[in-house]
Amino acid sequence: MPATLWSVRTGRDRLDSQTRAALIAAAKVTFSRLGYARTTVADITERADVSRATFYVYFASKDDVFRVLTEQLKDAFLEAQEAHGADPDNQVAVAAASVTHFVDVYARNLAFITVLEHQALTDEQLRAMWQGVRERLLKRMTRFVRQLVADGVAHPVAPPDMVATAASGMAVRFAPLIAASPADRPQIMRYLVRLYLQMLGIEPGPQAEETS
């Protein structure tokens, strides 16, 4: 393929990607502010500053883009559990990082999650999808706790699945506090990490404190 044609196609692909990303970002803000029922395609395109015709190049409906946002949320939670940035050889630091990253994702997406859970009450397919995401996250956390126990690092106060469930519940409760008062995040996270490590039966060290 001639270099000029390659450049043109690459530029067009990049523009397409930017337009799709702009529509997704606009949809997230609009759904979060108006809720699912009140949001229209016109609301999304107005915020993204594109035409309705452009919207339908990328999405079949507002439901379509809503499900894309749900998939992106799932990926963000899964990525958070990877605890990137923490020393992989320090399981205490990984535990602290994973829970703080998870809460950060929840806090950043709190408004959209509220809309998602409300919509899932009447949308069976969406409810099954969201429930599947939550179950997957819980199973991954449970496996992590079991691995900590197997390695002799953790001595949890309850069975691994119950510790994972309790940690998930804490994340759900702590996230709104951070969303409402971002300036209090460092202190809130310190308490969260301490509580999580206590449930695991792990003494918090300086690296765990730094992670928060």
Image (tube, rainbow, N blue to C red):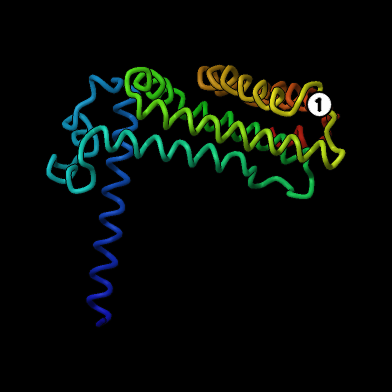
For the N terminus, the image quarter is: bottom left
Kindly identify the amino acid type of the residue bearing the numbered disc 1.
Pro
Circle 1 sits on which residue? 156
SS at circle 1: loop
Rendered residue at 18%/48% (across/down): 57
x, y percent for residue 2: 25, 82
Question: In this orientation, which residue lies closer to the viewer: 85 or 140?
Answer: 140
Question: In this orientation, which residue lies closer to the viewer: 106 or 147?
Answer: 147
Q: Quadrant of residue 71?
A: top left
Residue 200 drawn above or below residue 17: above
Residue 53 drawn above or below residue 187: below
Question: In this orientation, which residue lies closer to the viewer: 92 or 180?
Answer: 92
x, y percent for residue 190: 71, 25
Question: In this orientation, which residue lies closer to the viewer: 193 or 120?
Answer: 120
x, y percent for residue 77: 53, 37
- Decide if residue 162 is on the left or right side of residue 206: left
For the C terminus, the image quarter is: top right
Rendered residue at 23%/20% (across/down): 38
Rendered residue at 61%/39% (across/down): 81
